[in-house]
Amino acid sequence: MMELVCPAGTPAALRAAVEAGAHAVYCGFADETNARNFPGLNFSREEMAEGVAHAHARGAKVLVAINTFPRAGAEPVWHRAIADAERAGVDAVILADVGLLAHAAEAHPGLRLHLSVQAAAANPDVINLYASAFGVRRVVLPRVLTVEEIAAINREIDVETEVFVFGGLCVMAEGRCSLSSYVTGQSPNMNGVCSPASHVAYSEEGPDLVSRLGGFTIHRTPKGAPAPYPTLCKGCFTSEDQTGHIFEDPVSLDASHLVPRLARAGVSALKIEGRQRSRAYVAQVVRAFRAAVEAEAAGKPIPESALARLTEGQAATSGAYAKTWR
Amino acid sequence: MDLTVGPNFFFWDAAAVRQFYRSLANAPVARVVLGEVICSKRLPFWQDEIPQAVETLVAAGKQVAITSLALITLRRERRQTADLAGMGLPVEVNDLSALAHVPEGTPFWVGPLVNVYNEGSLRWLARRGATRVCLPPELPLASVTVLAQAGQELGIAVEAWGHGKLPLAISGRCYHARLHDRAKDNCQFVCGEDPDGRDVETLDGQKFLAVNGVQTLSQSTASMAWQVEPLRDAGVTALRLSPETGDFAALCASYSDRIAGRLSAADLSARLQSGGRRLSDGFLTGAAGMEWSGNRV
């Protein structure tokens, strides 16, 4: 059965995900070492150890994301996170930075290393390089590949692959985007945040609700209509005579119907995005996907009904998995 | 401190490429990186210009390197990348995948599209044979200072972004094709219509970004006009100038004059702004990348 890797932004979400059937949860420490460095989110050292004990007692794994790029002169902060994760007994750490990977391989030879999506390793050559240089055992693939390309990659590598199947969707190659820091000074790579709420401003102007990020207008929606969060790359912009969502519509990823094809492509693990989501949401999504991977493993059709509810009322895409997206 | 001309991000026809590299032969730059960095589909249209351009530049005393693509996914792109290592020039790695094809110990350069944020990354790259690194433009001056010093200890020359629209993101999706309602595989090379990228404004008409095929750039031109001294003090040994249309050799000369103290920061800025272009340098010392320190003086 494909492993279901589920988000845990809080200890409560971790327990909810495990109870709902997560094979593994991923989480981070409450600091700049992980790519969901949001206020009120993530784990203290004690909570991590408790979370690991809770998950292990129920047969689930804990993977810790330490996937921002360490700040020059402050690498010990990231090194401590790896040491503390190992001490807490986690099953793997998820890293993106080559300097950090080199450190982990050298200082923590017994610790299992996963390559974060933030490393955007998009072909067999670079995946094999990460495997031989650092002993990386699993690669989370960037959201720029089709299912066929993922299958081709799996034929040429010896390490496991994990792919995103549900939740927020980066349009750009992950870890290679500084749009957010251009506008707000804060980026996923350096600070673990994208389009931070601290830089969002809403204002009512005539018939419109306008949302701005760092002073730039991202959306203009009629008052009363649903106003999407002003994530930079999903805004409505103008280029010459065209106005629209030039990069991507305000959609999220739903690849649930691709579960059988991803299994045939040799994917080892399916990842659900959303460490910032509520535990109720996490539980619901995890339950639906657990049913899907169970059905797939048993050779049965994917139960549509469970997943339909999740995307109701919001636009979804299968993203780069279909070639036409490009 | 000297000047490096980076690879051209945009899709220019063969004649424009030829003219561009010819004009650089007499420009006051120490080195030039050329090759296709954004889209492998463009290369057949101008790759025959590369040998002549290399010959001209080498004869003019420039160091020359050949860049990898920024995002390598297709089999064809992997083959192209493997071929770079056999060209007899240093490869500038702009996707770590290229490293898989550079024999260990062979000297190579690292471009601004590779994430080098800390000493550990620099150390690992030095062990693999890196001799020159252009840092990601996103880095603040404090990081640049630490890395330039680490570079000196490791024998790596550290470059910083000097001039040009900022390379902010790379994607699997082609925005030029999308703007023309075409699939990437049937793009008909529409990015060639915009030799400096296609501008993107907000709904309120704010100048914002520029798209260039699968790449997203700032619409502002980043310029280190006011940052030459801080960067030199930090230990940065070269500024990278990113190709654009217009008299680029003259632009190189302006930066050369600025470095040599023959042109002031204010005069260089004024010269750059004369065509109405917006400048930025906020990644280095500002609160956000789009800011311009020229506004503070």
Image (spheres, helix red, strand yellow):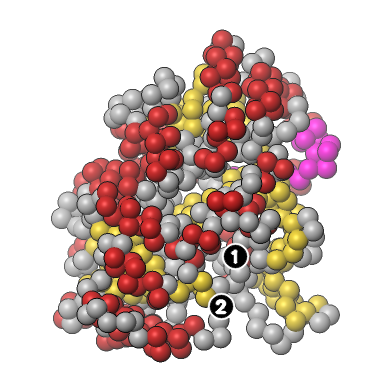
Q: Is residue B128 above or below residue A72?
A: above
Q: Which of the labelled discs sits on residue A315, or is there none? A: 2
Neighbour tally class for label 2: few under 14, some 14-19, many 20 plus, Cα within 10 Å: few
Neighbour tally class for label 1: few under 14, some 14-19, many 20 plus, Cα within 10 Å: many
The magenta span reads: B268-287
| Residue at left offset 72%, top offset 43% | B193
On screen, residue B163 versus residue A189, left or right, reads right
Q: Is residue A132 above or below residue B82?
A: below
Q: Which of the labelled discs sits on residue A181, or is there none? A: none
Q: Circle 2 sits in a helix, a strand or a loop, which is it? A: loop
Q: Is residue A14 above or below residue A90?
A: below
Is any part of residue B175 visible from this angle? no
| Residue at left offset 65%, top offset 83% | A226
Residue B270 horizontal/vertical position (percent): 81, 35
Amino acid of disc 1:
Glu
Residue identified by numbered label 1? A248
Q: Quadrant of the C terminus of chain A?
A: bottom right
Q: Disc 2 or 1, which lies upstream in sequence?
A: 1
| Residue at left offset 61%, top offset 69% | A249
Residue A284 vs residue B192, the one in the foreground: B192
Residue A86 horizontal/vertical position (percent): 21, 62
Residue B140 horizontal/vertical position (percent): 55, 46
Quarter of the image where one finds residue A49: bottom left
Amino acid of disc 2:
Ala
Q: CA distance from mark 2 to mark 1?
A: 11 Å
**Subunit ID for the residue under disc 1:** A
Residue A300 vs residue B230, the one in the foreground: A300
Residue furthest top as drawn: B59
Residue B264 horizontal/vertical position (percent): 75, 28
Quarter of the image where one finds residue B132: top left
Residue A41 vs residue A264, the one in the foreground: A264
